[in-house]
Amino acid sequence: TQTPETHEFQAEVRQLLDLMIHSLYSNREIFLRELVSNAADAADRLRFEALQDPSLFEDDPEPVVRLSMDEQARTITISDNGIGMNRTDVIDNLGTIARSGTRRFLDALTGDQKQDAQLIGQFGVGFYSAFIVADEVSVHTRRAGEPAANGVLWRSDGKGAFTLEESPREQRGTAVTLHLAESQDEFLDRSRLRQIVRRYSDHIALPIELADGEGAWETVNQASALWMRPKSEITDEEYRQFYQQLSFDTEPPLEWLHNKVEGNQSYTSLLFIPAQRPFDLFEPESGHGLRLYVRRVFIMEDREHRLLPRYLRFVRGVVDSDDLPLNVSRELLQHNRLIDRIRGASVKRVLDALERMARDDAERYARFWDAFGTVLKEGVVEDPDNAEKVAGLLRFHSTHNEGGATVSLEDYVRRMREGQKSIYYLTGESLAAVRNSPHLEVFRKRDVEVLLLAEPVDEWLVAHLNEFDGTPLQAVAKGQLELDELGDPDTPDAGEKPEASDSVKALINRIGEALGDRVSEVRASARLTESPACIVVGEHEFGMNMQRMLKAAGH
Ligand code: ADP
Ligand code: MG
């Protein structure tokens, strides 16, 4: 046999391990949640690959996670019969290569131990949490379908390096053994382990078994697919726990929607609307989608947004159908009528739920809007069929409110002044800049409300949202104003081009000469009541903010 090779941990992994070992004392028990969740993922991946190649099951088709302990040796072992790893997999996954989540996890740390421990699962650094309680960890593993001789043994004390050696393994899958650090003996207790599994992993849909000390195994979790149980038998607490185990979110969800559709194209969906943003909501390849199951077999996470459009990517949950083929592929997902139906119905369910929330519980809706409003705005562009519905869900800052973004287009239209024909808005780089814009002076004076838009996505939004419920949207900084009809006795000369006196004409000429080509025209205007001058954009040009964005993008 060969001698073990030593490999250095990648720099950020080293930092992470240092943190696990020295700073995360509270919530130490979450290491078990992470290792069990990896074992369950490995079972899912095996089932998925076995759809193409059933021989991967060898003679051991029932997925299971087993926990055992050795009090003498002071070790706990978490073993699974999942997909397993070969040598390359081990090197890629356990410490040599930087994973994108590692840096982000380090950046996201708050110093609040409880919160930081919760972050571990979200950032894909769960494996290393073993070092919160262990002073040595070993991973013995063999990839499904490969010969026993390809077994690999990984070992580390978490202090900068790990060793790797060949180690034949008859059994497919992975066994992670933790040698508990001093003072971690509480985890050598069967009832403590049982309690932790029930707390964090009850809804993992495969059996988690605990050795009873006499050679028998006891299943300690529910091990059933929660979404298949009748709604009436599931408690709110169970839904919340399930959500937690699915999302690793620290906050309970704002809402869940559980539906069973029967017929010759049957499916079940369980969708959650979270209360806070995940860290990667705005990454182009943002991590999550609904989890698709076919007859309880996990098929894939819908990262390509077939089951729900991108602008609803904050929704987490599960779709399970009896009427899709088990060997469903990405291509098939693109052209499948049942998938189209599920998508259509799911969009409607989510938008309806948001409408309900907005109507019945403004406070909760405000939380939703704070977290995901920016993403929902994309829907106006992405989903023309539902644009009107999405538009109704939008909330804005406005000259009529000081606090958060709470004004709906419906509110706006309801309080439009008599004779007012448009919904006025102003876009800009920041809320402060928009609020203080000289463009608003005449509107304030005439008590005409203006929506204040300061997010980058807002330019795209208004470029696509031409009207709401028959009322056109109109940028205040663009083209001619039509406030005349709103007649205001204080400014009888209101209008874009009042007669300019000779002295004003002279001034206009001088300014025009000074600015030259940089402007197309200098003119007198009744827009302003306090500031001496402002810049306006032609009716058919991009807004100022859009121009800034295009410039920044190199146009
Ligand atoms: P994540 O689970 O979010 O990917 P982890 O740090 O928990 O991050 O695990 C890192 C990787 O190590 C996993 O993505 C997987 O490829 C591999 N891995 C960990 N545990 C197992 C296991 N029990 N079986 C197979 N692969 C595993
Ligand atoms: Mg994990």
Image (cartoon, rainbow, N blue to C red):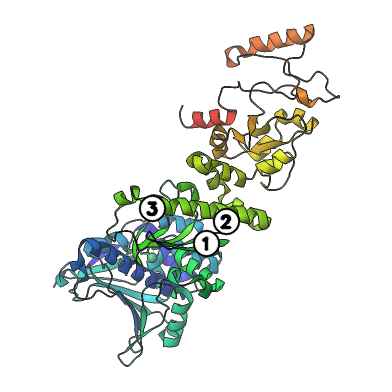
Taking the image as drawn, is residue 183 in sight?
Answer: no
Q: Percent x, y for residue 262?
A: 42, 63
Percent coordinates x, y for residue 137 in the rendering: 33, 74
For residue 22, above or below residue 408:
below
Crowdedness of circle 2 by 10 Å Cα count: few (<14), some, many (20+)? some
Q: Which residue is mark 2?
A: 353
Q: Nearer the viewer, residue 93 or 387?
A: 387
Q: Is residue 368 left or right of residue 20?
A: right
Give left or right: position of 451 versus 209: right
In the picture of the structure, the residue carrying the numbered disc 3 is 339
Q: Earlier in the sequence, mark 3 or mark 1?
A: 1
| For residue 428, side relative to residue 180 (left or right) | right
Asked whether residue 97 is in view, the answer is yes
Residue labelled with disc 1: 257
Q: Verify CB contact (< 8 Å) between mark 2 and mark 3.
A: no
- In primary-sequence order, the first of circles 1 and 2 is 1
Q: Amino acid at mark 1?
A: Leu
Instruction: Specify the quadrant that holds the N terminus.
Output: bottom left
